[in-house]
Amino acid sequence: MKSIWQGIIGAFNLILGFDRNIIEIVLLSLYVSFMSTIISSIIGVFLSLFITIEDFKFNKGLKGTINTFMAIPPVVAGLLVYIIFSKSGPFGSLGLLFTPTVMIIAQIIILVPLIAGTAINIINTKGSIILEELNNLNADKKSRYTLLFRELKFNIIATVFLGFSRAISEVGAVMLVGGNIEHKTRVMTTYIVLQTNMGNFEEAIAVGIILLCISFLVNLLISNLNRES
């Protein structure tokens, strides 16, 4: 018990002392998570609107694929990206393995189905009346996309924050494709795993506290957005 309290006290000393190593890790984590969330949101939100508004042959198949990939284990997504960007893979010549770029790509594979699938469920439940009214008015496609997004914007933005929350806390995929390299691909989650395995609990707890604070703020934003909707 004494060692736990010592670890917590040491962790706060590191945070309040603005430890350079920890700041670097936090900033890289935020960069990777922000970039993957932004790109995934653009793709995911468009996909959700496209699937619910458009009527095409493979609509149900695409929706089923998205629902399946919503539950993809992060380490499997990481393995897929690793194989593609390894030296023997089709994109190995790009030299992106063990870089922040490939970490972003791995997170995009995880986030796009999550954001798209969640947004589809929101549109099918809360947006069904809006879609019915738009159909009765024979609204054009552009109006359908615009009005549906406008009416459900708070729910959709909440879904985006949900994606960010998943990205910032992900460990399996980013460790596999990033390699947890110091000053290059080490993010908060992989740093916590490393320091815990090494027995450096002060460093692990310090970053854990920061990660908890970020998660709390994101969940608070999601709650407020859902309330606004």
Image (tube, rainbow, N blue to C red):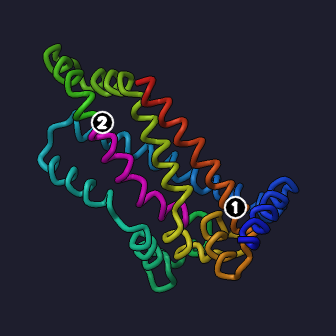
**Is 156 displayed left or right of 161 in the figure?**
left
Rounded to the nearest whole Å, what is the CA distance between mark 2 and mark 1?
34 Å
Amino acid residing under circle 1: Val
Residue 141 placement (x, y as % from top left):
25, 26
Looking at the picture, does residue 169 appear above or below residue 181?
above
Residue beneath disc 1 = 207
The quadrant of the picture occupied by the C terminus is top left
Viewer-nearest residue: 16 or 157 = 16
Tag on residue 121? none
Quadrant into which the N terminus falls: bottom right
Determine if the magenta segment contains residue 201.
no
Determine whether the residue tagged by mark 1 lies in a helix, strand or loop. helix
State which region is magenta. Answer: 103-122
At 43% across and 79% down in the image, what residue appears? 83
- Whether residue 29 is visible: yes
User: Mark 2 near mark 1, Cβ–Cβ under 8 Å?
Assistant: no
Residue on which disc 2 sits: 122
Quadrant of residue 70 in the image? Answer: bottom left
What is the secondary structure assignment of the residue under circle 2? helix
At x 31%, y 25%, the residue is 148
Query: Which residue occupies the foreground of this view, 160 or 89?
Result: 160
Whether residue 67 is situated above or below residue 201 in the rendered picture: above
Q: Looking at the image, which residue is at 20% across and 54% down?
A: 64
The residue shown at (50%, 81%) is 86
Amino acid found under the numbered disc labelled 2: Ile
